[in-house]
Image (tube, rainbow, N blue to C red):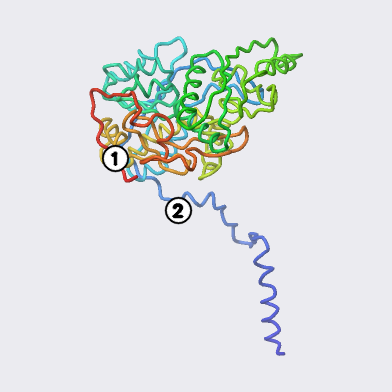
Amino acid sequence: MTYGTTLLRLAVAALPLALCAPAHAVEDPGRTLSEPAEKSRPARKRPAPKPKTVVDIVYLGKQYKEPIPLSLMEPVLNDKGIQGARLAVLDNNATGRFLGVETALKEHIVQEDDDVVAEAKALLADGPKLIVADLEPDDLLAVADLPEAHDSLILSMRSADDRLRQEDCRYNVVHIVPNWAMRADALAQYLIWKKWPRWMIVKGVTPEDDDYAEAVKRAAKRFGGEVVEERTYKFEAGSRRVETGHQQIQTQIPMATDNAADHDVIFVIDTGEAFGLYFMYRTADPDPVVGTHGLTSSIWHRAFEQWGGMSLQSGFQKLAKRDMTEQDYGGWLAVRAFGEAATRSPKHDVKALRDYILSDKFRVAGFKGQKMTVRPWDHQLRQPILIMAPRALVSLSPQEGFLHQHFPADTLGFDEPETACRFPEHKTPKTTVQR
């Protein structure tokens, strides 16, 4: 073996070690170390062009009194919704600026005792607006019915009230969040798929509890379930978090669920966060708990990570320093809907953007595996519903086997033949989407 051959083999043998070793900068007298990539990157990165068009989005909200979370692990939040909207503006502009379109968020949140209608009148004095409405039903309708709001488009991101999609629907309102009927149908489909068709309802005393209970009974009739019994429960705990409060809960809930008709699950309906969390593991029989607590139907959840959802979760945590709530997701999705329309519509005035969102050309992605569209008969946003355990995704509705002649998501909520919504002043264009 020659001397040259020996050197070549030694060099080949050392190559893997060199590739595996960490790279280090070599100090050489008379030379400086290379700058970190973070410092040199801005010089190479193309700056975003100055936008040709700026689309203003108004966030109109009110500081309603929120129920205190039952669990001490859940923080008391006073910025739900608006933080999602702020993130969506950043997401809109990350791509929109390169297309010559920028969205700007104008925040108008009044205090609980202030007049949101007066605030809306002032905002609309100089013309129609694109509005994200973080409002309860009565306030939403009062704003939507203003003559000044007639030509605006309002994306409702808060209320699940069924009547807003039925007899109290408005042409200038689009509903971003699912209503009670969609939530109940989503859970009902999963329960029927599991062959758990017998449901006992235990509901609270708020009007929202009554509305959700009616939606559950409707879902049972639609999908072959049965509400075998319905009970109203008013929980009056003395000191539920200290001393013997847990013992009071442990005694009350078995009594509230004892001697019930044969059932597969307890459908707990507690929209006011008064008692629902306490029902798991305390019922008289070993029952699964579903509804507003236990196994829930949700528009979003902090444990959801499919279809790139973790990128949205991490982006929100970085911005807001907390987890994303359903209300945050509603605000995010509403602003993203306006941003999507602004980048795809050839015109950017309010009328053009409203017509585009209400047309069959509109789509918005929401990290849930499919594009979302607006139903022409009640202006509800079609979307999948997450079936969530407290810390994990269980399923996604609509479930397999529940068929629809057009959109599978239209098995959730009020389909066109059963809608009570009428838009007397407008005729919605016929849908031509390839389904």
Query: Residue 53: where, in percent of width, then height?
Result: 30, 37
Instruction: State the residue at coordinates (70%, 90%).
Output: 2
Q: Nearer the viewer, residue 325 or 165?
A: 165
Q: Any mark on residue 345, and which?
A: 1
Residue 355, image quadrant? top left
Instruction: State the residue at coordinates (49%, 23%).
Output: 217
Against 252, residue 285 (above or below) is below
Q: Secondary structure at mark 1?
A: loop
Q: Is residue 314 visible?
A: no
- Report how far apart the C-alphas of labels 1 and 2 lie in the structure: 32 Å
Q: Amino acid at mark 2?
A: Arg
Which residue lies under the disc numbered 2? 44
Q: Amino acid at mark 1?
A: Ser
Q: Are marks 1 and 2 in contact (CB under 8 Å)?
A: no
Q: Any mark on residue 213, and which?
A: none
Graded by Cα atoms within 10 Å as few (under 14), some (14 to 19) or many (20 or more), the crowding at tag 2 reads few
Against 61, residue 428 (above or below) is below
Query: Residue 113: where, in percent of width, then height?
Result: 45, 9
